[in-house]
Amino acid sequence: MGDREVESYYAGDISLRELAARVSTLDLFSSARGFWLKDINALQATKKTKQELAMLATALPGDAVLVFSQDTYFGGDWLAQRRFEQGALRKAVADVVDQQVEASVHPRKLAGWIRQRAEERYGLKLAAYQVDTLIDVCADLPSLIDGELKKLALLKTREGDTISENWFKIVLARTWSYSAAKIADAVLARRTDAYRFLLRIYRRESIIARLLPELYRGLLRLYWIRSDPDFRSRPEFRRVGWRLEKLQEAARRWRREALLKALTVVTDTAFRLRTGRMGGRTPQEAERDLLLLMLRRLYAL
């Protein structure tokens, strides 16, 4: 916003009426001409909300700017992301703004940003594969990537400005998304080492909440690659970036009919998880056994 001073608020902390009052009664001695309402998913998708959004837009002075934003990562819950993107709330917000911008970074530019951030902020020199891995396991989100760089920087006294492959894997292996991503990649590529990954990981953590959406999303992308010549224009490929080549290679290992059955297997596994239809002496063993059964069904297709 250039030289504008920006006042930022979270949608869960201020009502739209309060914000409208603040916007319409700007202090003559304040330089604030930008207002940022964050996490708008906290608003209720009601007729009243739509009316208050319209009132807020009307109250905005001509030289001021109002920005609505929402982090659509939702902790890796792709269903929550889809509900938001296709929901009435987003449409209501879109109806009252002049311009919609999806804040995303092209993978090549993101890679450059990671290298620059690592070197200038944390004094780290990352190898190309380390940059690509960070993009992959952090869902292209700079905020998550920066958190991982901060952890890697703690190894500088041991490793110097370059982090060895072994220590890099150890640090990232502790992230929730990395474990699920390794298993999902193995399944999509039809590599049987998914069993080994799963058994080793379940000694220390539960990953089912991350793995099932990750796997379903990956299989759905493979299905569209096999079915739709214009698959790149589909919303499922909006943030794929450099991983597209890997997905296309994996898709060649599947028949389209098998992918449809695989999506059903993952959906059935999620249903069993939600309804508690699984065995095991402990909840963790039950989840592990449910995932092992899912893997056997997938590899049998």
Image (cartoon, grey):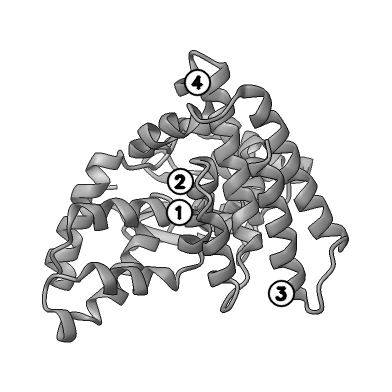
Is 93 in front, or is 17?
A: 93
- Label 1 neighbourhood size at 10 Å, few (<14), some (14-19), many (20+)? some
- Label 3 neighbourhood size at 10 Å, few (<14), some (14-19), many (20+)? some
Earlier-in-chain disc, 3 versus 4:
4
User: Label 4 is placed on what type of residue?
Assistant: Phe
| Residues at circles 4 and 2 in contact by the CB criterion of under 8 Å | no
Q: Secondary structure at mark 2?
A: strand
Real-space CA distance between mark 3 and mark 4, rounded to the nearest whole angstrom = 38 Å
Look at 39% across and 45% down and name the residue there: 64
Look at 73% across and 73% down and name the residue there: 285
Q: Which residue is mark 3?
A: 284
Q: Residue 290, percent across and down?
A: 75, 60
User: Label 3 is placed on what type of residue?
Assistant: Gln
User: Label 1 is placed on what type of residue?
Assistant: Trp
Q: Which residue is mark 4?
A: 231
Above-or-below relation of 249 to 197: above
Q: Residue 232, located in which quarter of the rendered image?
A: top left
Task: Please indicate, yes or no, whether residue 25 appears anywhere in the rendered image.
Answer: no
- Disc sitting over residue 36 in the figure: 1
Q: Which residue is mark 2?
A: 66
Q: Residue 214, percent across and down?
A: 57, 49
Residue mark closest to the camera, 3 vs 4 = 3
Earlier-in-chain disc, 4 versus 1:
1
In the displayed structure, does residue 11 sit left or right of residue 164? right
Look at 53% across and 63% down and name the residue there: 196
| Residues at circles 4 and 1 in contact by the CB criterion of under 8 Å | no
Real-space CA distance between mark 3 and mark 1, rounded to the nearest whole angstrom = 42 Å
Marks counted in the figure total 4
Q: Residue 191, percent across and down?
A: 50, 46
